Amino acid sequence: MIRPYEDKDNKEIEEMLIQEGIPDIEMRFRNYDTFVLEEDGEIKGFFTIKKEWGVPSIQHFCVNRKFRSTEMARKLAKAMKETVKSMGSSKLILHSKSEKLDKCIKYYFKKNPYAVRNDTAFFFVEV
């Protein structure tokens, strides 16, 4: 089940981001709309959406390492797309700092980046 972030999720989300090497200054999940994928009382993943130029932009997209699989990533991506649609948008900005993630985005959304700057690829995709 996808649900909005609650304060009780704070510690677990912080731990997930630390495991991914995200520094404190880049942990923006409290500042923007964050949604948690929870099953059986455990957080399986989450994503954070910020608006840039009126378009939803993903700040965090993370599957908990304990549950990481292609299936779980697809489930979280589907929930992300549905959430963006429910916000009234058909477009989404994604960014990636790794070739592995670039490949996932290209495969899932069938799009190439519109720009690459400072080792970050930027994608503008349809949901």
Image: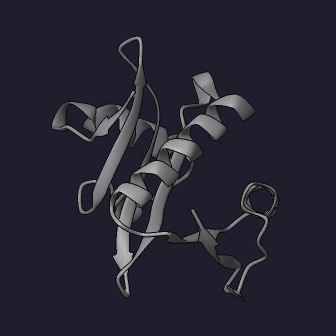
Position of 67 compared to 56: left or right?
Answer: right
Question: Could you tell me residue 76's position as x and y percent?
Answer: 54, 40
Question: Could you tell me residue 64's position as x and y percent?
Answer: 54, 32
* Quadrant including the C terminus: bottom right
Picture quarter containing residue 6? top left
Is the residue 92 above or below the residue 1 in the image?
A: below
Position of 111 compared to 126: left or right?
Answer: right
* Quadrant including the N terminus: top left
Is the residue 23 above or below the residue 115 in the image?
A: above
One can see residue 69 in this view: no
In the image, what residue occupies the spot 24% across and 54% down?
A: 30
Question: Could you tell me residue 71's position as x and y percent?
Answer: 70, 30
Picture quarter containing residue 33? bottom left
Q: Nearer the viewer, residue 28 or 35?
A: 35
Is the residue 52 above or below the residue 26 in the image?
A: below
Q: Residue furthest top?
A: 40
Question: Could you tell me residue 116's position as x and y percent?
Answer: 72, 86
Q: How is the image coloured?
A: one colour
Picture quarter containing residue 56? bottom left
In the image, what residue occupies the spot 52% across and 70% down?
A: 92
In the image, what residue occupies the spot 33% across and 62% down?
A: 87
One can see residue 102 in this view: yes
Count of numbered badges drawn on the protein: 0
Q: Nearer the viewer, residue 98 or 3?
A: 3
Q: Residue furthest left?
A: 7
In the image, what residue occupies the spot 29% across and 34% down?
A: 11
Q: Nearer the viewer, residue 103 or 53?
A: 53
